[in-house]
């Protein structure tokens, strides 16, 4: 499918983010976009550790994402999410890493602002919304904001312009996880592990 970059790229274009300056790759996008599976594959290819921000949130809270939403509400979840993101960014040392964000993280202005750094690449994984919904339905993951197809679609459309502020945008439809991971490493010109 199509690789989008250039005019749709955000303020930090890949050209300004050479392999030597990128210390973290953040995968962003809607539920079902493949952020976690692509992140794991990318981490393996680059030999960079992979982390899912939702896992950090669950570890901090000792509760599942679903429980946090149910017991404390979305506002509380977003606060923990921002705290967890700050923690990840503060800990970025010389060892680079790959991080998958939850679907709502990058659309929070504060989080997007925190990610505007020269040493961070943000990759928006996109795909047709029906496909994203189908993928979510196949997975054993409790997603409090998934809802019906109609609700899912409306939320996706409201967020899409914000995801598009990522440095790179990739259409994942019809591509397997390894192909998307390969594409990310190629666009960022980061050497892969043999
Ligand atoms: C959310 C997406 C989820 C998780 C939480 C909220 C969202 O992550 O962070 O349920 O607001 O879209 P995934 O995108 O990994 O499902």
Image (cartoon, helix red, strand yellow):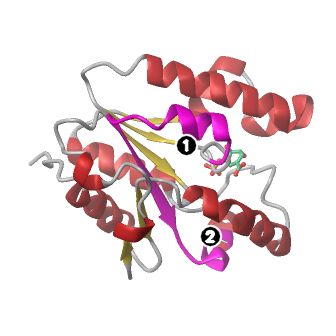
Whether residue 111 is in magenta: the answer is yes
Residue drawn at 84 percent across, 74 percent down? 150
Whether residue 149 is in magenta: the answer is no
Q: Which mark is residue 132?
A: 2
Q: Nearer the viewer, residue 137 or 185?
A: 185
Q: Position of residue 92 (x, y in %)?
A: 37, 22
Residue drawn at 49 percent across, 36 percent down? 115
Q: Badge 1 is on which residue?
A: 101
Judged left or right of residue 114, residue 185 is left
Q: Is mark 1 within 8 Å of ligand 1?
A: yes
Specify the segment rendered in magenta.
107-133
- Under circle 2, the secondary element is helix
Judged left or right of residue 31, residue 149 is right
Q: Which mark is residue 23?
A: none
- Decide which of tag 2 and tag 1 comes sooner along the chain: 1
Q: Position of residue 123 (x, y in %)?
A: 43, 54
Judged left or right of residue 175, residue 188 is left
Judged left or right of residue 71, residue 37 is left
Residue drawn at 74 percent across, 27 percent down? 79
Q: CA distance from mark 2 to mark 1?
A: 16 Å
Q: Splitting the image into 4 quarters, where does residue 93 fall?
A: top left
């Amino acid at each position: 499918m199509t690789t989008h970059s250039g005019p749709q790229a955000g303020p930090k274009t890949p050209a300004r983010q050479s392999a030597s300056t990128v210390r973290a790759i953040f995968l962003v996008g809607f539920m079902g976009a493949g952020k976690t599976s692509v992140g794991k594959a990318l981490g393996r290819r680059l030999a960079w550790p992979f982390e899912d921000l939702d896992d950090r949130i669950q570890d901090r809270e000792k509760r599942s994402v679903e429980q946090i939403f149910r017991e404390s509400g979305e506002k509380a979840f977003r606060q923990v999410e921002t705290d967890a993101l700050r923690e990840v960014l503060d800990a970025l040392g010389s060892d680079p890493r790959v991080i998958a964000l939850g679907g709502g993280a990058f659309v929070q202005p504060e989080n997007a602002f925190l990610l505007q750094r020269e040493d961070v690449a943000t990759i928006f994984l996109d795909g047709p919304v029906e496909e994203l919904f189908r993928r979510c339905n196949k997975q054993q993951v409790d997603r409090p904001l998934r809802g019906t197809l109609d609700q899912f679609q409306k939320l996706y459309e409201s967020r899409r312009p914000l995801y598009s502020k990522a440095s790179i945008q990739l259409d994942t439809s019809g591509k397997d996880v390894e192909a998307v991971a390969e594409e990310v490493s190629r666009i960022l010109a980061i050497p892969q592990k043999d």
